[in-house]
Amino acid sequence: MSQNLEKSKVSIERNKGIVLIAAAVILSIALGGGLMKVGAGFASRASDGITVTGSAKVEATADNAVWSLNLNESQTTLASSVKKIDASADALKKYLLTGGISADQIELGPINSNAVMEYINGNQTGRILSYQAYRTVTVRTKDVDLVSKLSNNIGTLLATGVNVGNYGPSYYLSTLDSMRAKLLAAAMKDAQSRAKAITEAVGGEVGGLLSVTSGPTQVTTKNSLDRAAGGVYDLSTIEKTVNVTLSASFKTN
């Protein structure tokens, strides 16, 4: 009798073990399948595409200059201030012509004037102290080196008594648009190369282009790191660095 009971217990325990093993196998398969699905889902989302930044830059030399000079004279009468500003404009024009600027590259702006009133304790007395006359002279030329030289030597004119304000020439790139188009093409190749390197590093392949967004053009002093969201255009130097960036998204396999 006791032997039969022992056999029954062994049989029951064995069946329980089989059930537990079977349940564990079923559970592991279920969990494994679930994990595989979750894993495949993440992999699918990660392999949908890749977004990279591409950039390109070039050193460029300005080929246009605009140089504005401001004349300012003050005299006791309006007539004398106008006469003085005319004389100053003639002296400035002579300085420019003698220096190598041609007459058709010089623009003489209109004469503006205003009365300087007397104030006592913050109140205007009605008495005119002097008259100020203003005039702007603008030089436009492609000879950027000549303009730079004349700007640096303007002190010789100041020494003669001509009151001229010189804030320096502005130097421009006339070919910036075509330059930018070439740089964007180079930046696109850079972006594609980066996407390929990153994707192939994890065993994938780069597919077609999904989207591309170009950034602003940065025209800076040579090798400068200056950047702005809306772009930079340095006008103070002849030698410049032009930099463009873009963001490109590619399909991946």
Image (cartoon, helix red, strand yellow):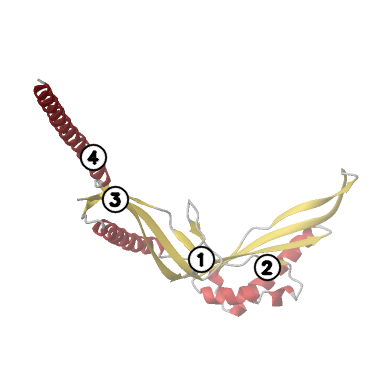
The residue at 21%/42% (across/down) is 40
Q: What residue is at 19 percent from the left and 38 percent from the top?
A: 32
The residue that label 3 is drawn on is: 50
Q: Which residue is mark 2?
A: 89
The residue located at (70%, 75%) in the rendering is 155
Pick the front one: 94 or 150: 150
The mark nearer the N terminus, 4 or 3, is: 4
- Against 218, residue 29 (above or below) is above
Q: Could you tell me if the residues under marks 4 and 2 are in contact, i.e. CB atoms within 8 Å?
A: no
Q: Amino acid at mark 1?
A: Ser
Q: Which residue is mark 1?
A: 224
Query: On the image, which quarter does residue 182 sit in?
Result: bottom left
User: Closer to us: mark 2 or mark 3?
Assistant: 3
* Above or below, comparing residue 118 to residue 8 in the picture: below
Depth check, front residue: 143 or 89: 143
Q: Earlier in the sequence, mark 2 or mark 1?
A: 2
The quadrant in which the N terminus is found is top left
Say whether disc 4 or disc 2 marks the residue closer to the N-terminus: 4
Is 97 situated left or right of 42 in this image?
right
User: Going by the image, does 173 lie left or right of 39?
Assistant: right
Distance from disc 4 to disc 2, alpha carbons, whole Å, reads 77 Å
Which residue is denoted by mark 4 in the rendering?
A: 41
x then y, percent, for residue 248: 31, 52
User: Seen in the image, is 155 located left or right of residue 43?
Assistant: right
Q: Residues within 10 Å of mark 1 (few under 14, many from 20)?
A: few
Q: Amino acid at mark 4?
A: Gly
